[in-house]
Image: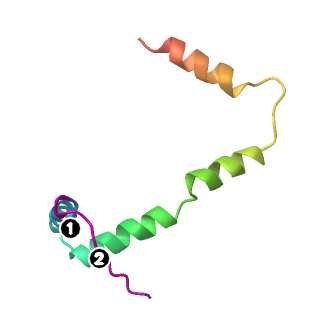
């Protein structure tokens, strides 16, 4: 396991992270480590979009049409 020192975050961010850590019943270090681990457990947006390009295409389905249909169904 590695250590990470974070400098230069705003006091507002630090205070909010500290508050959330207290609400979760863990230390600030444990809370931030959990956030970072959760963030890196999923692909980045760029990687995820790249993976979408690798999916097989279906000739009778259009993502754009599905989005338009879903938007048109909104009240």
Q: Is residue 43 above or below residue 66?
A: below
Q: Quadrant of residue 75?
A: top left
Report the quarter where the N terminus lies.
Answer: bottom left
Looking at the image, do the residues carrying marks 1 and 2 touch, with CB atoms under 8 Å apart?
Answer: yes
Q: Which residue in the protein does label 2 denote?
A: 30
Q: Is residue 23 above or below residue 29?
A: above
Q: Quadrant of residue 64?
A: top right
Q: Is residue 40 left or right of residue 16?
A: right
Q: Secondary structure at mark 2?
A: helix
At a point 81% along the width and 36% down the height, the residue shown is 57
> Gap in Å between the C-alphas at discs 1 and 2?
8 Å
Q: Is residue 40 left or right of residue 33?
A: right
Q: Name the outermost residue toward the right.
A: 59
Q: Which residues are magenta?
A: 1-12
Residue count near mark 1 (Cα–Cα under 10 Å), binned few <14, some 14–19, many ≥20? some
Q: Nearer the viewer, residue 62 or 15?
A: 15
Q: Which residue in the protein does label 1 denote?
A: 21
Residue count near mark 2 (Cα–Cα under 10 Å), binned few <14, some 14–19, many ≥20? few
Q: Is residue 38 above or below residue 48?
A: below
At a point 75% along the width and 45% down the height, the residue shown is 53
Q: Secondary structure at mark 1?
A: helix
At a point 27% along the width and 77% down the height, the residue shown is 29
At a point 20% along the width and 66% down the height, the residue shown is 14
Magenta region, mostly helix, strand or loop?
Answer: loop
């Amino acid at each position: 396991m590695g250590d990470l020192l974070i400098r230069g975050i705003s006091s507002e961010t630090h205070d909010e992270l500290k508050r959330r850590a207290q609400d979760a019943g863990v230390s600030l270090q444990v809370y931030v480590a959990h956030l970072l681990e959760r963030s890196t457990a999923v692909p980045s947006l760029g990687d995820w979009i790249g993976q979408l390009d690798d999916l097989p295409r279906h000739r009778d389905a259009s993502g754009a049409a599905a989005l338009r249909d879903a938007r048109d169904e909104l009240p």
